[in-house]
Image (cartoon, grey):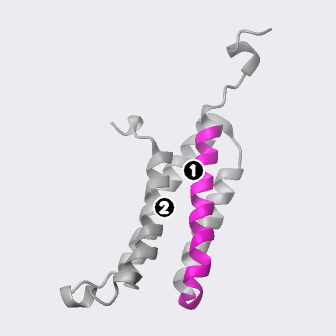
């Protein structure tokens, strides 16, 4: 069942959803307390989202690294993105400045991993040329 999941696509989706959460929910901040909802700057929720992104991303990138390409760039990009996500939690006043770079690094890592995982190992043999 898990082998048919495109983990890179799931990682990109998780990163984008996290960015949407961080961008849109502050706009609705005035109405959320009326409904008893406190997701904005809720440390448990925020760290839970980071843990989810870490689990999915690690699974996707490690699989691609180990089975397909052995290139460290996606892992380094992902690591930088995760460090930036944690940094935005520590330095709340810089959250909106740090978040776009975190999301871009994580999405770039998944896209690079996806691209490298689908690259033929021997392009001359697969294209029919000798």
Q: Name the residue that disc number 1 marks.
A: 110
**In this rendering, is residue 113 above or below 51?**
above
- Callout 1 touching callout 2 (CB < 8 Å): yes
On the image, the x and y values in percent for residue 76 come to 68, 58
- The boundaries of the magenta stretch are 91-115
Residue 93 seen by the camera? yes
Magenta-span inclusion, residue 101: yes
**Could you say which quadrant of the image residue 13 lies in?**
bottom left
**SS of the residue at dot 2?**
helix
22 on left or right of 118? left
Instruction: From the viewer's perspective, tell me whether residue 33 is left or right of residue 55.
Output: left
- Report the residue that reaches farthest toward the right: 130
Along the line of sight, which residue is nearer the eye, 6 or 127? 127
Q: Residues within 10 Å of mark 2 (few under 14, many from 20)?
A: many
What residue is shown with label 2? 15
Task: Indicate the position of residue 10 as horizontal and vertical percent values.
Answer: 43, 50
């Amino acid at each position: 069942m898990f082998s048919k999941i495109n983990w890179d696509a799931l990682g990109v989706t998780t990163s984008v959803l996290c960015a949407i959460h961080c961008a849109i929910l502050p706009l609705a901040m005035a109405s959320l307390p009326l409904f008893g909802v406190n997701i904005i700057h809720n440390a448990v929720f925020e760290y839970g989202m980071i843990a989810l992104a870490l689990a999915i991303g690690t699974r996707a990138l490690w699989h691609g690294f180990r089975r397909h390409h052995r290139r460290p760039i996606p892992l380094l990009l992902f690591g930088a993105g995760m460090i930036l996500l944690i940094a935005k939690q520590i330095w709340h006043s810089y959250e909106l400045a740090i978040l776009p770079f975190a999301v871009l690094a994580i999405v770039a890592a998944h896209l690079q991993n996806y691209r490298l995982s689908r690259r033929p190992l021997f392009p001359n043999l697969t294209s029919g040329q000798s």
